Every structure is written in C-alpha cells, then in structure tokens.
Amino acid sequence: HNPEQKAALIFGMGDGDASCCRPCIAGKSLPATEYHSFVRDEVVRRLGLAGFSLSSFVSIDRDEVFLKIGLDSDGQNIRVLAQKFQYQMPIRREAYAGFDPNNPGRKDEFG
C-alpha cells in the first residue's frame, strides 16, 4: 500500500478514495514521520469534531507525544455514546430497592 491507500483504510473510505488526504500526501512517497504526523493530525481533527476534549503534551525525553482524550461527564456526547453502546452504569443494589428489574414500573404500583 502507498500512503494514500493506507490513509483511505484508516479513515474509513472503503472505496479507496482518499481525496480528503490528497492535499497532504498527493500520491508521493512520504517519510514515516510525515505520514505519522498526518495521521495524528487527522485523528485529532476528527475527535475534536466529534465533541471530544483534547490536550497533548510531550514526554520528558521529548520522543513521544501523549494525547489526552475526554468527554464532559455531564455532556450530551457521553450520553449518546452510552446509549449507542448500551453502557449500563454500575449502581448499588440499594438504589433499585423499590423497582422490579423485569418491570419498568415500580413494585408498589404493579405488585
């Protein structure tokens, strides 16, 4: 694979169309550092567009860049993702003392 084909695979363009990547790589062979930089920048851009909060910092040795990715714990995006992936919050059983897990209503209302 050339860099353009790899970019198409990474960014989900199943038809092999990497037109969004062409301004950067333009069919030429890139050194690995430039390719990694391109991929990193594109991932960061897409995560930002998806509503993630992002911050980065360089390692003490200055040979690695760390990216912190987060979501507002009370924000809409985390709720959408939790619903999409059917994530269930672990909550103590006492919180459900008045509810029947097989019935969406309360026990005292539905027996």
Image (cartoon, helix red, strand yellow):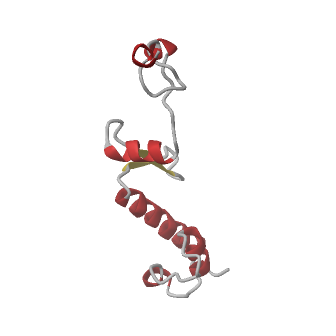
What x and y, as percent, mark residue 17? 54, 83
Residue furthest out toward the right: 1
Relative to 76, say whether 93 is above or below.
Answer: above
Residue 104 or residue 36, whichever sits in front:
104
Q: Which residue is drawn at 38% across and 57% down?
A: 50
Residue 22 or residue 57, whichever sits in front:
22
Residue furthest out toward the bottom: 27
Relative to 24, say whether 39 is above or below.
Answer: above
Q: How many labels does the image show?
A: 0
What x and y, as percent, mark residue 38? 48, 70
Q: Which residue is drawn at 44% across and 65% down?
A: 41
Question: Residue 27: which quarter of the image?
Answer: bottom right
Question: Residue 1: which quarter of the image?
Answer: bottom right
Q: Which residue is drawn at 50% across and 26% down?
A: 103
Q: Residue at x 49, y 62 (%)?
A: 40
Residue furthest out toward the left: 75
What x and y, as percent, mark residue 24? 45, 80
